[in-house]
Image: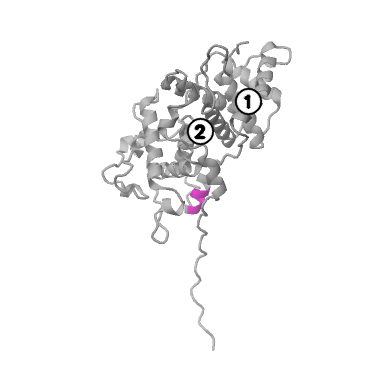
C-alpha cells in the first residue's frame, strides 16, 4: 500500500535560545538602578549629576571621533563606551587634595585602546596616538610624530592607564554586543533587508551609546528596544509565534523594553537636537505598566505617532542622527 505524498511543510525556524546563565550573571554584575547611578564616585565627592553626565558624553564622543578616524567598526566603539561607563562607576573624575584623577579623555582613549584588542580590531599604537591628539586638539590635520611632545605624553598616558582600567573593570572584558543580537533578531523575523527598519534600529543603538543605558539594561534588552524602535518607524509587524508575543520569543521582558524606550525619549527631551524641533524618540514613549503595545504600530491605539512626528523621527544615512555632540574640549593633558 502506497501512501499519498503529503504537502511539504516549510522548515520550522529555530527559536532563539535564552542567553547562557553565565553570560546573564556576568552582565548583571554591571547593571544598576537609576538611584545607584546618582551614587557614582564623582557625584558622591561633590560633582553635580548633570556635570558628571556631560563628562561621560564628552568622553564617549571622543571615542566615536577617534574611532571614525581609525575606521573602527561600531561594535568596537560600543565596547569602548561600555568600558568607559563602567570605569566611572568605580572611579571619580573630581580632583581632591592629594589625588589627581585621570582626565575623561585619557580614560576614553585607554578604553578604546583596550576595546580594539578585546574585539580584535587592533590598530598600531602610533595611529591611535595620532588620532587622539588630533581629536583632542580639534585639528584633524595636525602633524604628530615621535618628535612631538604630545605624542609621547598621550602614548605614555594610554599605556599607564591600561592597568588602571583593567583593575577597575576587575579584568571582566566580556561584553555582549547589542548589534549582533539585534541583527540576529531581525534575521529571525526576516526583516534584515528592510533598510528603513535597519537604519532606525542602528540609530537607536548608536544614540544609546551616548547614554548610560549600558549600566541600566543588559545588551539583549537594548537590542530588543532598538528592534521595536525600528519596527515602529518602519511600520513593520513582528508576528507572534505559537501565540507568544515577540518579546517573549526573544527572552526579554516587556516592561524593560518600555523603560529603555522611555529613557531615550527622556534623555533627548532634556538635550534636543539643534537641527530638529521634535524629539525623534518621543513616539516610543509608553506607560511602563500601561497598555500592551504589542508588536505593531496598529496595536498602539492612543499612543500613535502622527505623520509629522514620524517624518521627523527618521535617522540620517549613517545611522547616528544629529543627536551626537561633535564638539571637543581642551586637548592638552596636564602634567
Q: CA distance from mark 2 to mark 1?
A: 34 Å
Q: Residue furthest front?
A: 98
SS state under label 1: helix
> Does the stretch in magenta take in 288?
no
User: Based on the displayed image, in which of its 4 quarters is residue 225 positioned?
Assistant: top left
- The span picked out in magenta is 184-188
Height in image: 211 above or below 144? below
Residue 115 at x, y percent in the picture: 62, 32
Colouring style: one colour
Residue 54 appears in the figure: no
Outermost residue toward the bottom?
Answer: 1
Q: Nearer the viewer, mark 2 or mark 1?
A: 1
Q: Quadrant of the C terminus?
A: top right
Residue under the image location 57 percent in, 47 percent down: 22
Residue matched to label 1: 164
Which disc number belongs to residue 29? none
x 71%, y 16%: residue: 145
Please provide percent x and percent y for residue 326.
50, 22
Q: Is 186 colored magenta in this rendering?
A: yes
Looking at the rendering, in which quadrant would you find the N terminus? bottom right
Closer to the camera in the image, 80 or 301: 80
- Indicate left or right for 124 with 330 as reference: right
The residue positioned farthest toward the right in the image shown: 147
- Asked if residue 53 can be seen in this view, the reply is yes
In the rendered view, would you say 213 is above or below 159? below
Binning the other alpha carbons within 10 Å of mark 2 as few (below 14), some (14 to 19) or many (20 upward) gives few
Residue carrying label 2: 318
Taking 116 as reference, is 191 left or right? Answer: left
User: Relative to residue 253, is residue 290 drawn left or right?
Assistant: left
Circle 2 sits in a helix, a strand or a loop, which is it?
Answer: loop
Residue 33 in the image: state x and y as whole percent: 43, 35
Secondary structure character of the magenta stretch overall: helix
Amino acid at each position: 500500500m502506497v501512501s499519498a505524498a503529503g504537502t511539504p511543510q516549510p522548515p520550522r525556524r529555530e527559536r532563539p535560545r535564552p542567553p547562557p546563565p553565565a553570560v546573564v550573571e556576568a552582565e548583571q554584575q554591571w547593571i544598576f538602578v537609576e538611584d545607584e547611578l546618582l551614587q557614582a564616585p564623582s557625584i558622591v565627592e561633590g560633582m553635580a549629576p548633570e556635570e558628571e553626565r556631560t563628562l561621560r558624553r564628552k568622553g564617549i564622543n571622543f571615542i566615536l571621533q577617534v574611532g571614525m578616524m581609525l575606521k573602527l567598526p561600531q561594535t568596537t566603539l560600543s565596547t569602548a563606551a561600555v568600558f568607559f561607563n563602567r570605569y566611572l562607576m568605580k572611579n571619580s573624575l573630581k580632583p581632591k587634595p592629594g589625588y589627581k584623577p585621570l582626565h575623561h579623555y585619557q580614560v576614553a582613549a585607554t578604553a578604546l585602546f583596550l576595546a580594539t584588542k578585546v574585539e580584535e580590531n587592533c590598530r598600531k599604537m602610533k595611529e591611535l596616538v595620532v588620532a587622539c591628539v588630533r581629536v583632542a586638539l580639534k585639528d584633524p590635520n595636525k602633524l604628530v610624530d615621535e618628535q612631538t611632545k604630545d605624542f609621547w605624553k598621550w602614548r605614555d598616558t594610554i599605556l599607564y592607564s591600561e592597568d588602571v582600567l583593567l583593575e577597575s573593570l576587575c579584568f571582566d572584558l566580556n561584553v555582549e554586543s547589542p548589534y549582533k543580537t539585534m541583527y540576529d533578531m531581525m534575521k529571525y523575523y526576516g526583516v534584515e533587508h528592510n533598510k528603513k527598519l535597519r537604519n532606525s534600529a542602528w540609530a537607536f543603538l548608536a544614540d544609546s551609546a551616548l547614554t548610560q543605558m549600558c549600566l541600566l539594561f543588559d545588551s539583549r534588552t537594548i537590542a530588543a528596544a532598538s528592534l521595536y524602535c525600528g519596527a515602529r518607524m518602519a511600520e513593520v509587524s513582528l508576528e507572534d509565534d505559537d501565540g507568544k508575543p515577540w518579546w517573549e520569543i526573544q527572552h526579554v521582558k516587556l516592561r524593560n523594553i518600555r523603560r529603555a524606550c522611555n529613557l531615550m525619549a527622556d534623555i533627548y527631551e532634556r538635550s534636543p537636537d539643534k537641527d530638529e524641533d521634535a524629539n525623534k524618540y518621543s513616539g516610543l514613549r509608553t506607560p511602563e505598566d500601561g497598555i500592551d503595545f504589542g508588536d505593531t504600530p496598529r496595536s498602539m491605539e492612543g499612543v500613535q505617532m502622527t505623520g509629522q512626528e514620524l517624518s521627523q523621527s527618521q535617522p540620517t544615512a549613517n545611522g547616528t542622527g544629529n543627536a551626537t555632540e561633535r564638539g571637543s574640549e581642551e586637548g592638552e593633558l596636564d602634567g
